[in-house]
Image (spheres, helix red, strand yellow):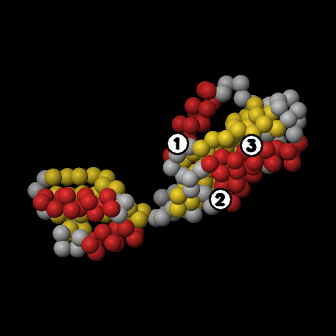
Amino acid sequence: MNYIDSTYTDTLEVKQSKFIAFLTPFSQYEKTLTELKQEHPKARHFVVAYRHLNEYEQIVEYSSDDGEPKGTSGRPSLFVLQGAQLINTAVIVVRYFGGTKLGPGGLVRAYSDVINLSLLKAKLLEYKKEEEIEIQFEYSNIRMVEYECDELNIEIIQKSFDNQTLYKIKGSKESIDLFLKKMNRLVEVI
């Protein structure tokens, strides 16, 4: 499975209709949709599709035709996301109607093509399940702990310096396991 961490866009014109695709991380979906509706007040349709993981690691999917003929825009958009094995990703296609009806086949092609164009620009990242743990260690070991976190792409979410030095860290299972193996004498998992 793959995901993206920034927004990618591309435009396609078919028989004077303009299709603008915005491929965006799911976390930015609501904000991006709101902004696009303000930026494009004369657009006829805002077709959306997304796939994301819920708290149980299940894939949740959604699509909307937003007034286009049923099944000609939202579902094909979702199929492109599925084909690229994208999760935690949304796509919004802004359509300006050009006056010529494209028919069901033309709409399916146009929506699929514009999303595929934005996918060509996208940097796809491999999804790895992440886990969070809390560790405790001596204050004198901060530099080594932070260095190893940086080397292994482990994010330090929270730091606490009460009686003991406590960090909450997050990373892929492989990275966390390797970190604990390297630091086994210096850190303790709480």
Q: Residue at x 25, y 58 (%)?
A: 146
Mark 2 surroundings: few (<14), some (14-19) or many (≥20) residues within 10 A: some
Structural distance between the alpha carbons of marks 1 and 3: 20 Å
Indicate the secondary structure of the residue bearing disc 1: helix
Q: Quadrant of the C terminus?
A: bottom left
Nearer the camera: disc 1 or disc 3: 1
**Hey, what amino acid is under mark 3?**
Asp
Side of 31 where 162 appears, left or right = left
Name the residue that disc number 2 marks: 84
- Asked if 157 appears above or below 135 in the picture, the reply is above
Q: Quadrant of the N terminus?
A: bottom right
Mark 2 vs mark 1: in front: 2
User: Mark 1: which amino acid?
Assistant: Gln
Q: Residues within 10 Å of mark 3 (few under 14, many from 20)?
A: some
Labelled disc at residue 112: none
Identify the residue position indicated by label 1 in the image.
28
Q: Is residue 168 visible?
A: yes
In this picture, residue 106 sits left or right of residue 142: right
In the displayed structure, would residue 181 be above or below residue 150? below
Q: Earlier in the sequence, mark 3 or mark 2?
A: 3
Tell me the SS state at disc 3: loop
Q: Residue 2, image x and y in percent? A: 56, 60
Residue placed under numbered mark 3 in the picture: 65
Give the spatial CA distance, label 3 vs label 2. 20 Å
Question: What percent of the width, then of the height, locates residue 35?
Answer: 57, 31
